[in-house]
Image: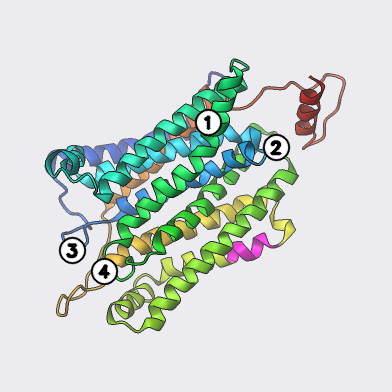
Amino acid sequence: MKNKSREFWIFIGILLVFIAIGQFNWMRYLTHGPGLSGSSDVVPWGIYISGLAYFIGLSAGATIVGLMHHAFGRHDYEPLAIRAIILGLVCVIGATQCVLVDLGVPFRGLKVPLILHNFTSLFLVSSSSYYGFMAILSAELYFSIKVLTGKASPRQKSISKWLGILAVPYALWVVHAFTGSIFGVVKAREMWNTAMLPVHFVISAIASGFALAIMVAVITSKAEKRELLSKETYEHMGKILCFFVLITVFLDFFDYFIMRYSGKLEAMETWHIITTRYIVTFVLNIGGLVLSFILLLFKKWRTPNRLLVVGSIIQVAIISYRINLVSVGQLAPLFPGMGEIRYIPTFSEVTIILGIFALVILLYTILTNILPVEEKVHEPEHSDFKPGQVLSHIKQEKLNS
């Protein structure tokens, strides 16, 4: 990190400012109580839980890169493999930070296992799975770096491969599906109480996480002024992303269709809130996903720069979905005469969640700069390379060796 440009350090400084403001407000929250907060006893889950669902989804979706590399033999994904592991790891850290902030006092996290002795609680199962996922990703990162640096034994290479494969079902089934189950088992909430919610969580996680991995590849290429992946790899990633966006649109559409068509009082209350007070996030969610799917159908939109645009649209769409799910799911009155319920996050809550986002970006930036993330291959002195030919040369060198 010694030879970094001035722009790099300005970027780091901006992230530190956001982190400092968020940390200040959290410390004030710990020492003086929550004060003015958008959350209440009626709407206990706010922007922090939306952040939790989003970060967990990103971490789960990022593991697809490792699956493509290890299980399907797509070695053109290799330059992104370790970066995707780090991306998944820092996103899990971001998710746990959202949980700790939402608890108010972090030690409350010990209440379920130590005081209530409820070891079958979905809160305990889900939160424990986050730390198990962190352990798997940390081990995968360790062995992958050993393989990259040529210090791994055949057994360690095998461990690295199988950890990369194991991370996917663990992330999607154990981590993210159980997070969706926390919402799905709440009978009093019409928008949550469906067996399809864990499936919806998993598919939207793959879409957002894989889209973010593509964005990371493109941004890295621009920052380092070199080709990280080939055009063919971006084309392949765009097709995979298109498939998962389509499934996400399918699930979203029928979620809302059944809610509207059922005619149940609670469902109609929820539909009314979504299409009035939350119409902006509703349009961003459905409109963003539909637009992304349509764009990805065309080959010209499966190029690096345009995939960056599509990936950004998908992030906005999935964030909007998480906000709608968590917030709107609690705003429908539970009994007659309850009145209109509102949730608006306060400025301090917004600064804390932005601080967590900044922390995740900072951790990723630092780790990818201090750890070996891809094989360093020098271009021959007597060959002129055009953009995109370096990867072909790397493959040829490996075959020759």
* Label located before the other in sequence (2 or 1): 1
Can residue 352 be seen at all in this image of the molecule? no
The residue that label 1 is drawn on is 8
Q: As drawn, which residue projects farthest toward the right?
A: 382
The residue that label 4 is drawn on is 331
Residue type indicated by callout 4: Leu
Tell me the distance, in whole angstroms, between the alpha carbons under discs 3 and 2. 50 Å
How many neighbours does mark 4 have within 10 angstroms: few (below 14), some (14-19), or many (20 or more)?
A: some
Label pair 2/1, CB-CB below 8 angstroms: no
x, y percentage for residue 89? 44, 35
The residue that label 2 is drawn on is 76
Residue 294 on the magenta span = yes
> In the depicted view, which residue is nearer to us: 220 or 204?
204
x, y percentage for residue 274? 37, 72
x, y percentage for residue 110? 19, 38
Tell me the distance, in whole angstroms, between the alpha carbons under discs 2 and 1. 28 Å
Q: Residue at x 57, y 38 (%)?
A: 66
Residue 341 on the magenta span = no
Q: Residue at x 18, y 46 (%)?
A: 118
Q: As drawn, which residue projects farthest toward the top?
A: 151
